Amino acid sequence: MSDTNDGATDHSTVCPLCAVGCRLEPGSGSRADGVPGPVNPNGRLCRKGIGALDIDTEDRLTQPLLRDGDELRPASWGEAYERIVDGIEATLDRYGPDAMAFFGAPHCTNEENYLLQKLARMLGTNNVDNRARLCHESTTRCLEARVGWSASTNGLAELSDADVIIIAGANPAKRQPIAFNSFVRPAVNNGATLVHIDPIGNATTRLAEIHITPRPETDALVFDLLSARLLDGNDVDREFIHERTRQFESFAASLQSLTPTQAVSAAGVDETQIDRLAELVTTADGVAALVGTGIEGDDTNAPEALLNLLLLTGNIGRPGAGLYVLRGLANEQGATDTGCVPDRLPGHQSVTATDARERITEEWGMILPSIPGKNVREMLTACGKEIRAAVVVGENPAISKRDPDWTRNRLDALDHLVVLDLFLSETASNADVVLPAAAGFEKRGTITNLERRVQRVSPTTLPPSSARSDFEILRDLGALLLPDSNAFEYQTVADVFDELTRIAPTYEGLSFAELGPSGRQWPVDSDSTLYRDSFETADGRAVFSNDRSRFAFDSASGLSLIAGGRVGETQGDDSETKRRLRMHPEDAQDRDIEEQDLVAISNEKQTIEARVELDENVRCTTVYLPARVADPLVRRGTSAITVESISEQEKI
C-alpha cells in the first residue's frame, strides 16, 4: 500500500521546527526557502527555518534493529514486526491492555498521532499521551474547563486589532520570531502597547513599553492585582459579565482578601507599573495575551488569574483580544486535537462522553475503554510495575525532566519496548525493537499550528534506505495486531484525516483535498475568532475562577533559577548551549562575582559550572541559564540555587 496518492498538488511543506507553521520549500543545497503563507506572509524564515531541511544523515537509522542480549542487530521489517507483535500479544495475554503504554509525539503528523491513540484504544487501554499536553497543561486545561477548547482563542492576524498586547512567561521574539515580526511588531508600530511580564529581559523586552519583572511563580499575583484595581475603579465590562459569564460574584468576593501592599511586596513589582497597565487595559478596545511555559508550574495558577482578567474586561470572543498559547513544537496542538492524551478522545471529547463514544464505536466497530489512562509521568513511573510494555513514537522519554538514571532504570524494567525514531536516541538504546522513521519533511500528512491552522505537509525528499513514515508503520502494526478488523486498512494519509473529521467535532467539515496551501483553521463554521456568540460550555457561558493566587516570600530565600526554553526545542540554536549564567550586577556584587567569572551553581543535589554574564535586564534574586545547560539542575532539584565564584584551579 502507498501513502502518496492523496490528491495533494502543492510542493511546499511546513517547517517542522516550531508551532508557528511557516511554509517553505527546498532551496539551494540544504537551505530552505520561505514560501508566502498565512503565518509568514512575506515568505520569510528564521535562521532555524532556513536550516530546517539540513539533517545529519550520517547517524540516521536506515533499517530495523532487534535486541539480542546486550546488543542491537540489524533485521528485516518482517522480522521486526513479528518481534513487536509477539511482545505486545504476550503482554496483553499475561497482564491485560492496561499494562501497555503509548507515547506520542508533537513532531509527528495529525494522522500519525491519531493512529497511535486508535491502536492503543482498540487494544483496550487509554494509556496514551504526548509531552505537548504537559508543556502548557495549566493554560490549556484552564481554557478547556472555563471557555471550551484547549487552544488559542484567536488567529495571529487579529493582533493588528489589539490596543494592548501582554506577553507573559515567553520570548516569542526569539522562540517564534516570524510570528513576532509578522504580527506583534507591526501591531506595536501601528500604536499597540506591548507589555512584557517576565523576570528575565530578553529580545521580546526590547520592543515592550512596559517590562514587569515579578518574582518567579508570582505571575498569578500580578494578574489578581490588576483585576482588583479594575474592580475597585469599576473599570470592568458589566454587560459582558452579566450576559456571558457566571460565578462573577464569588470571584469578586475572593479578591477582597487580597491586600495590595502585601501582594506588591510579595511579587516584587513596581506598583506604578501595575497602575499604568491597569489604566491601559481600562482604556483599550482590545487586549490580547500571549503566554508561554514560563507561567506554568505546580505552585502557580497564573493562567486562571489571567483568564479572569480577560473575562472581567470582555476581552474574549472578539478580534484584537483573547488568549494565545505560544506552543513550541511543530504539532503540539494537533497531537492533542487528535486524542493522543489519556482522558480525551479526538476532538477534545472526554473518554466518558456517551455521544463521542457512540460515534467512534460506530466508526471503529468496537466499544472503547472508558476509564482515563495514565499520563506521561504516570506511565514512566509505572514502567516495570503496572506497565510492562511500551510503544514510543518519535519521542525520547529517557531525557525527560526526571533523574536520567531513574528514567533509564524504568525503561530497562519493561518486558518489551518498541521505539520509532530517526536516530538511536537514549530511549532507543534501551529498546527491544527500533524502527527507522521518516523525518517531518520526508512524509505526507497534516499538522496544526498554534493558531489552530491545519496545514498539509509534503515530502521534499525521500527517507533514507528502508526507513518508513510513522503512518506506514502504525498502519501495518494495527493490521497485524487486529487481524479480524479492517480498522487499519488505509490507502493514504488522506483516508486517516477524513476519518478524523468524522469523529472529531473540531475538525468536522475539513477535507484533506481542499485544505490548499494556506490550510484551514478549526472549527470551520467560524472565522479565526472563537466564542463570538457563546462559549463551548454546558450553558454557553464562560466561568470565573475564585481559586486565588498563593504566595509566600522569604527575603532570605536566596536566588531562583530560570531555565530558558525547553530541552528538545532548541535545534540549531547555538545560544541555548552556551554556558553563560545571566545575573543582575547587584546580586553579583553581593557575592564578590565579576563579569566572566567561573561560578558553581548548585541546588540540593547537583552542581554545574558556567561563566557569568552581568545583565541589568535580569531581576535581582533571579538568575538565568539556557535550558540545555540548566537541565541537570532542573531534573534533580528545585529552582532555589546558590552561586559561588570558583578559581580556575578549583574547577569541578
Image (cartoon, rainbow, N blue to C red):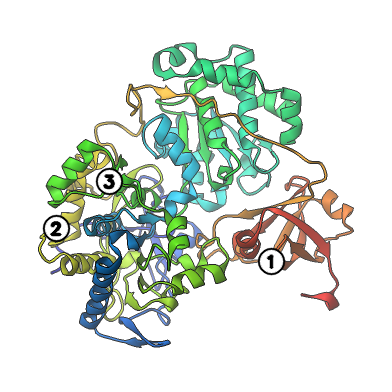
Write the residue at 25% across / 50% down: 369
Of the image marks 2 and 1, the number of the one nearer the N terminus: 2
| Tag 1 secondary structure | loop
Write the residue at 67% across / 23% down: 258
Contact? badges 2 and 1 (CB < 8 Å): no
* Of 184 and 404, the residue lying toward us: 404
Q: Amino acid at mark 1?
A: Arg
Q: Would you place residue 484 above or below residue 535 in this image?
A: below
- How far is disc 1 from disc 3 in space, using C-alphas? 48 Å
Q: Position of residue 74 (x, y in %)?
A: 32, 87
Residue at the disc numbered 3: 370
Write the residue at 16% across / 66% down: 479
Residue at the disc numbered 1: 579
Q: Within the image, what quadrant is residue 116 found in?
A: bottom left
Residue at the disc numbered 2: 487
Q: Amino acid at mark 3?
A: Ser
Q: Would you place residue 108 above or below residue 258 in this image?
A: below
Write the residue at 34% across / 77% down: 434
Contact? badges 1 and 3 (CB < 8 Å): no
- How far is disc 2 from disc 1 in space, using C-alphas? 50 Å
Of the image marks 1 and 3, the number of the one nearer the N terminus: 3
Q: Position of residue 180 (x, y in %)?
A: 51, 45
Report crowding for label 1: few under 14, some 14 to 19, many 20 or more residues within 10 A (C-alpha). some
Of labels 3 and 2, the one closer to you: 3
- Residue 245 can be seen in this image: yes
Q: Within the image, what quadrant is residue 625 found in?
A: bottom right
Residue reaching furthest to the front: 94
- How far is disc 3 from disc 2 in space, using C-alphas? 19 Å
Report crowding for label 2: few under 14, some 14 to 19, many 20 or more residues within 10 A (C-alpha). some
| Tag 3 secondary structure | loop
